[in-house]
Image (spheres, rainbow, N blue to C red):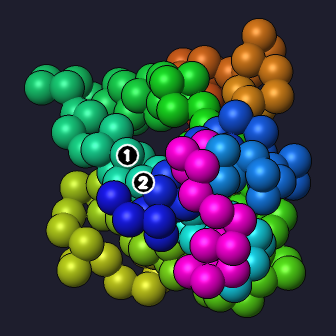
């Protein structure tokens, strides 16, 4: 690897170990195997630009991992509610197995307020995520998902994932299980749809 790749790898390690705000230039260069501090300016312009590039890499990896986690969640012969609960079990498992990636996604949201390029990247990722989630839940190819389905089914699932993720990252002892998420959704539907009662 060259200096640029070493710096990105070092910054990724620092993001996992220390987070965005607590990572210093010295931390990054040490994690990059002693690459000079001047190399950060040469390749990225600033510590912030390097950390943002590393965050974008982490978020892209998170998106890929999430797609893998959700693909093929359906159990043969299971009904829709059981399939949905199985999907939630995989999602919740990933909160623990890939905790640094989920934390990086939250840090990226905070940094996006100050860095337009990062904000645009995250917004694009959210659009793709909503469409992908809608396709998975509807059992269709992404090309068949229209804007309405993306902004309803996909957006609602993404909002649920974000909320459940936050609970699992902050207080896993009290965070809902997959069965509780599904039961909660049933309760919401029953409370808002007179025909569901």
Position of residue 185 in the picture relative to residue 115 (left or right): left
Q: Residue 35: give x, y in percent of width and height.
A: 58, 57
Residue on which the image places disc 1? 65
Q: Is residue 126 visible?
A: no
The N terminus - image quarter = bottom left
184 lies above or below 117: above
Q: Marks 2 and 1, Cα distance to the nearest angstrom?
A: 6 Å
Q: Are discs 2 and 1 less than 8 Å apart at CB?
A: yes
Secondary-structure class at tag 1: helix
Q: Residue 126: give x, y in percent of width and height.
A: 55, 71
Direction left: furthest residue = 76
Position of residue 123 in the picture relative to residue 131 (left or right): right
Position of residue 182 in the picture relative to residue 3 (left or right): right
For image coordinates 27% across by 34% down, the residue present is 73
Residue on which the image places disc 2? 61
Tell me where the magenta segment starts and ends, as one range. 31-44
For image coordinates 82% across by 21% down, the residue present is 171
- Residue 42 shown in magenta: yes
Q: Where on the picture, by quarter, is residue 108?
A: bottom right
Q: Where on the picture, by quarter, is residue 14?
A: top right
Secondary-structure class at tag 2: helix
């Amino acid at each position: 690897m060259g200096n640029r790749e070493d710096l990105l790898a070092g910054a990724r390690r620092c993001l996992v170990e220390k987070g965005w705000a607590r990572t210093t230039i010295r931390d990054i260069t040490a994690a990059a195997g002693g690459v000079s501090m001047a190399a950060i300016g040469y390749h990225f312009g600033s510590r912030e630009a390097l950390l943002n590039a590393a965050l974008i890499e982490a978020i892209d990896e998170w998106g890929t991992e999430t797609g893998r986690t959700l693909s093929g969640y359906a159990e043969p012969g299971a009904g829709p509610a059981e399939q949905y609960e199985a999907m939630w079990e995989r999602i919740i498992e990933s909160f623990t197995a890939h905790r640094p990636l989920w934390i990086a996604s939250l840090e990226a949201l905070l940094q996006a307020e100050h860095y337009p390029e990062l904000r645009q990247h995250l917004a694009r990722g959210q659009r793709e995520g909503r469409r992908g989630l809608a396709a998975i839940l509807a059992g269709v190819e992404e090309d068949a998902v229209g804007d309405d389905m993306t902004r309803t089914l996909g957006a609602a699932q993404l909002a649920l994932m974000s909320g459940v993720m936050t609970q699992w990252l902050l207080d896993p002892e009290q965070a809902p299980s997959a069965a509780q998420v599904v039961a909660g959704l049933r309760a919401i539907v029953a409370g808002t749809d007179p025909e569901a009662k």
